[in-house]
């Protein structure tokens, strides 16, 4: 308890100077030399990974970003956001402190023991799947309340350090002289904000909006559909389509002047979106037992067809759609057991952009094209629907242009279009069943399906 109180106070001091520590863990907390005035004083050491959360010239919070190939910290104690390569902010130090406290109290964390190349992925997945109740089982109530609060913090949220201290301060003795750790820093902080011991609780403040909680320990998979504002046009959808029924739906659509714009799969059945606004002049497709069928794709490239939509099923099969009339000049694709952000980053530098994505089981397929109508592109990758990241990207002029999800993760590629659309409206929807009724409501508002996939949305 005493450690928690003073550690929060130390982080408040560091944060008030515009820095985050970036590697909060038990090994980086030290007491002063025995027999000196500092023997009960707690110190936080090793600032090797410290970064600024506030711009020193403007005083503004640093900009949000996500680079899934960048990890800073110690795997056992790192925040989920650090695992996912998000820009460090104050919330990350608090999440790492929460894991540090539970480790010191219980002697172990649920994600210890993972080995191998994908250790970081497995640890992050376990952190996301562990609810505060499970993590803090048999711990005093303030620990669960603290964990619950810090894992729900937003990127640039102002932190109420006195509130956190009051949680733990309420269950320790009132006499500071007999405390094993000097808590002067924490007491000063409490005094400065005029808070009396134990008065503050972690319920939502009256002027705060209740938050949607994450990491409930109850994972869910859903349909994710993305809608763009378009001029009125003909669009058609088919879902729960078995392999044998695909040709008749596609042929009928082609007869009516429609081309496939996107495809998806759920439970080894296909979903198909066809519309009149693709700009394509010809189209071919292949249903293959492979994920993906390289020889067929290369044959079509020779005939100037380019991949325009792709989906994979849990049984490892794939549906690849290739079209003429795209703006693409060259294509490359990669199939990988994990999300291949390093490869994407390399191809970005070569002038390629992600133009289609798919998953089959836990495998990913990413298609990148030269000549795509984008000027910039970013990725949002998470073990749930990354609502905060998507909204931040929307605010900066990005729009979702590709989606894909496995049972574990959801990935969204957001792009800045070269030519700004007249109406930039974009909406997303998450539904347990294919959103057939919602689609018609969207059509009535001239919003049309631009992308669809099925996979992880809730942790």
Image: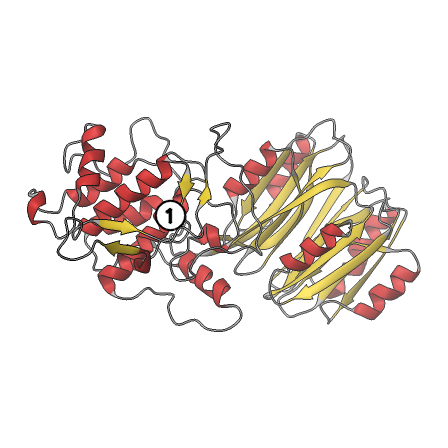
> Percent position (x, y) of residue 147?
31, 49
Nearer-the-camera pick, 431 or 186: 186
> Percent position (x, y) of residue 86?
51, 48
> Percent position (x, y) of residue 384?
50, 51
What secondary structure is marked by label 1?
helix
Few, some or many C-alpha atoms within 10 Å of disc 1 (few <14, some 14-19, many ≥20)? many
Question: As drawn, which residue projects farthest toward the front?
Answer: 36
- Asked if residue 373 shows in the view, the reply is yes
Seen in the image, is 361 located left or right of residue 165? right
Query: Tag count in the figure?
Result: 1
At x 47%, y 52%, the residue is 82
Nearer-the-camera pick, 203 or 346: 346
- Asked if residue 322 shows in the view, the reply is no
Q: How is the image coloured?
A: secondary structure
Seen in the image, is 284 located left or right of residue 201? right
At x 75%, y 54%, the residue is 368
The residue identified by callout 1 is: 93
Nearer-the-camera pick, 44 or 174: 44
Nearer-the-camera pick, 281 or 6: 6
Seen in the image, is 221 located left or right of residue 282? left
> Percent position (x, y) of residue 227?
65, 39
Seen in the image, is 165 located left or right of residue 57? left
Quarter of the figure with residue 91: top left
Where the C terminus falls, by quadrant? bottom left
């Amino acid at each position: 308890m005493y450690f928690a109180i003073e550690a929060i106070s130390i982080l408040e001091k560091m944060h008030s100077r515009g820095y985050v520590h970036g590697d909060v863990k038990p090994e980086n907390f030290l007491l002063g030399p025995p027999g000196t005035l500092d023997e009960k004083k707690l110190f936080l050491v090793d600032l090797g990974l410290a970064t600024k959360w506030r711009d020193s010239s403007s005083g503004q919070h640093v900009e949000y970003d996500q680079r899934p190939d960048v990890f800073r910290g110690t795997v056992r104690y790192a925040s989920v956001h650090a695992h996912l390569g998000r820009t460090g902010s104050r919330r990350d130090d608090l999440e790492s402190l929460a894991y540090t406290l539970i480790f010191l109290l219980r002697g172990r964390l649920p994600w210890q023991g993972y080995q191998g190349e994908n250790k970081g992925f497995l640890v992050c997945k376990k952190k996301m799947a562990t609810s505060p109740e499970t993590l803090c089982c048999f711990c005093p109530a303030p620990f669960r309340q603290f964990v619950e609060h810090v894992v729900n913090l937003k990127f640039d949220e102002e932190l109420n350090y006195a509130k956190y201290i009051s949680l733990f301060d309420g269950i320790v003795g009132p006499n500071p002289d007999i405390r094993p750790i000097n808590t002067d820093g924490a007491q000063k902080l409490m005094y400065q904000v005029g808070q009396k011991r134990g008065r503050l609780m972690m319920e939502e403040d009256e002027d705060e909006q209740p938050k949607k909680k994450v990491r409930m320990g109850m994972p869910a998979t859903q349909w994710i559909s993305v809608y763009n504002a378009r001029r009125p046009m003909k669009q058609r959808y088919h879902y729960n389509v078995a392999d044998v029924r695909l040709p008749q739906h596609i042929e009928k659509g082609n007869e009516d002047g429609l081309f496939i714009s996107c495809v998806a799969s759920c439970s080894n059945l296909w979903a198909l979106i066809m519309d009149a606004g693709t700009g394509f002049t010809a189209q071919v497709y292949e249903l293959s037992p492979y994920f993906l069928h390289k020889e067929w794709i290369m044959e079509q490239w020779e005939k100037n067809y380019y991949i325009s939509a792709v989906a994979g099923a849990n049984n490892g099969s794939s549906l690849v759609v290739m079209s003429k009339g795209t703006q693409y000049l060259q294509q490359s694709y990669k199939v990988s057991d994990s999300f291949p952000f390093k490869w994407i980053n390399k191809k970005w530098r070569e002038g390629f952009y992600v133009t289609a994505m798919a998953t089959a089981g836990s495998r990913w397929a990413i298609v990148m094209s030269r000549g795509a109508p984008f000027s910039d592109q970013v990725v949002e990758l998470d073990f749930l629907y990354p609502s905060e990241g998507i909204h931040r990207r929307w605010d900066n002029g990005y729009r979702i242009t590709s989606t894909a999800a496995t049972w574990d993760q959801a990935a969204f590629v957001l792009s800045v279009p070269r030519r700004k659309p007249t109406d930039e409206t974009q909406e997303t929807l998450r539904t347990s069943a294919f959103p057939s009724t919602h689609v018609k409501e969207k059509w009535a508002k001239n919003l049309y399906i631009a992308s669809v996939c099925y996979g992880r949305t809730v942790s």
